[in-house]
Image (tube, grey):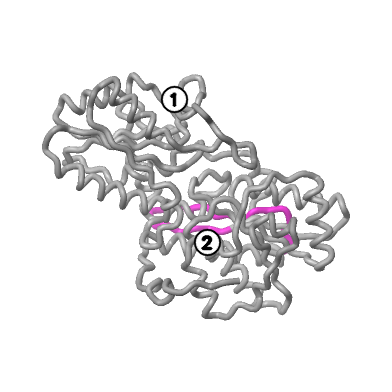
């Protein structure tokens, strides 16, 4: 049984294809997919993935969005009981969960409940997260492609901003990332020291001070420079209060729905400085842009799907497949597994030693981390199939 859950990414389907391909090469068994994420398990809505053709799998590998569908669902004991009963009825012994932090938590819950129920079930988590906040992995599949998209956006926006000589303006670019600044930091790779547009980057790991931000913008304006303000959706003040905390809504997992901080900053800049300000929120485009897919990202997600099947064949259970970076000047990923217990409920934050709190910019060492993950253009491959989609 395979489940996709949480926010989709540009490469979540690549892991699905890697897994299905690896299984079919070794054994001839039914491979079920839960339609609509956990909802499929709760409502017994399944599709057969072992019937997909090689041509279909090749299309799916390079297609963003969750092929099986996804959702966010707060899991209780009744859900767990039903899920285990369903898996028993189908004689499912291998359970693969593709997702982020919340998904790894649910995978661990299902594994523990299966053990409590004396049901022999191998549970493997397959990581994905554009936020790059999963613990015990160098970087999460989906992050590199989202970062590549934001770098491209930032570079293009900067060209546009520099087209205007006067008056000097402020442009705000809001990124996803929840409680981490990995995506906002990626925009730093588009910075140009020769540009007449100065970047200011704010991340959740460092308390946001409105007065300091306004002073920096005013200083840029007095120095005859435009300002490109890059803000992560989850920035907070010194009291850990979200900057965009007014009228806060919550999702199905009781987590705050983030977003909207750029509008609040626009209002503050206009009221306090009177400087012309506009804001840009690329929203879900960050996680589904086909033209900015990183080939490294696609292949690593695909390989992690393969490694998930290899993990159960080696007797692993209640683990997440992962990758680390081999030391050296050449980027080489090394694949392995980590206990789900060590992954759940832990967020991997952007290293504050990579952030300059005085200038609100990202240090060069981060560029060395991210640059190798951006390689490869998949556009020539995509042209063969993006006009058609695979329906299940």
- Residue 184 position, x and y percent, is 39, 41
Vertical order, 284 against 168 (above or below): below
The residue depicted at 55 percent of the width and 60 percent of the height is 66
Badge 1 crowding class, 10 Å Cα cut-off, few under 14, some 14 to 19, many 20 or more, is some
- Whether 327 is among the magenta residues is yes
Vertical order, 133 against 86 (above or below): above
Pointers 2 and 1 in contact (C-beta within 8 Å): no
User: How many labels were placed on the picture?
Assistant: 2
Is residue 152 or residue 205 the one in the foreground? 152
The answer to whether 22 appears left or right of 275 in the picture is right
The answer to whether 221 appears left or right of 233 in the picture is left
The residue depicted at 81 percent of the width and 50 percent of the height is 113
What quarter of the picture does the C terminus occupy? Answer: bottom right
Q: Which residue is mark 2?
A: 301
Is residue 61 or residue 136 the one in the foreground? 61
Badge 2 crowding class, 10 Å Cα cut-off, few under 14, some 14 to 19, many 20 or more, is many
Residue, far left: 165
Asked where in the image residue 74 lies, by quadrant, the reply is top right
- Residue 312 position, x and y percent, is 71, 63
Vertical order, 79 against 289 (above or below): above
The residue depicted at 65 percent of the width and 72 percent of the height is 49
Residue, far right: 118
Q: Which residues are magenta?
A: 314-335
The residue depicted at 65 percent of the width and 57 percent of the height is 37
Q: Which residue is mark 1?
A: 207
- Residue 167 position, x and y percent, is 14, 32
Is residue 319 or residue 180 the one in the foreground? 180
């Amino acid at each position: 049984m395979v489940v996709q859950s949480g926010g989709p990414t540009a490469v979540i389907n690549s892991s699905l294809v890697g897994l299905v391909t690896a299984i079919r090469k070794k054994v001839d068994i039914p491979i079920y997919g839960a339609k609509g994420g956990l909802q499929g398990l709760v409502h017994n809505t399944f599709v057969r993935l072992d019937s997909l053709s090689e041509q279909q799998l090749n299309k799916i590998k390079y297609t963003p969005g969750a092929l099986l569908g996804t959702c966010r669902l707060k899991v209780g004991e009744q859900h767990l009981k039903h899920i285990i009963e369903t898996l028993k009825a189908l004689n499912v012994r291998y359970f693969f969960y593709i997702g982020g932090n919340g998904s790894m938590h649910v995978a661990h819950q299902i594994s523990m409940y299966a053990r409590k129920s004396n049901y022999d079930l191998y549970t493997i988590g397959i990581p994905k997260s554009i936020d790059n906040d999963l613990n015990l992995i160098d970087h999460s599949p989906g992050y590199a492609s989202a970062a590549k998209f934001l770098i491209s956006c930032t570079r293009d926006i900067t060209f546009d901003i520099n087209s205007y000589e006067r008056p000097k303006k402020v442009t705000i670019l809001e990124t996803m990332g929840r409680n981490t600044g990995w995506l906002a930091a990626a925009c730093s790779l588009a910075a140009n020291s020769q540009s007449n547009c100065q970047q200011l980057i704010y991340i959740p790991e460092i308390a946001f001070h409105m007065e300091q931000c306004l002073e920096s913008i005013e200083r840029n304006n007095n120095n005859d420079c435009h300002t490109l303000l890059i803000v992560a959706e989850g920035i907070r003040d010194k009291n850990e209060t979200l900057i965009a905390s007014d009228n806060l809504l919550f999702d199905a997992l009781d987590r705050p729905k983030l977003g909207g901080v750029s509008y609040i900053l626009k209002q503050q800049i206009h009221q306090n400085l009177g400087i012309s300000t506009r804001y840009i929120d690329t929203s879900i485009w960050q996680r589904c842009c086909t033209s900015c897919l990183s080939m490294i990202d696609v292949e690593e997600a695909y390989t992690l799907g393969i490694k998930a099947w290899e993990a159960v064949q080696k007797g692993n259970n209640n683990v997440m497949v992962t990758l680390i970076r081999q030391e050296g000047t050449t980027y080489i990923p090394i694949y392995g597994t980590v206990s789900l217990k060590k992954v759940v409920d832990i967020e991997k934050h952007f290293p504050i030693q990579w952030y300059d709190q005085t200038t609100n910019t990202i240090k060069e060492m981060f560029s060395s981390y991210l640059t190798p993950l951006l390689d490869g253009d998949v556009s020539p491959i995509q042209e063969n199939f993006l006009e058609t989609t695979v329906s299940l």
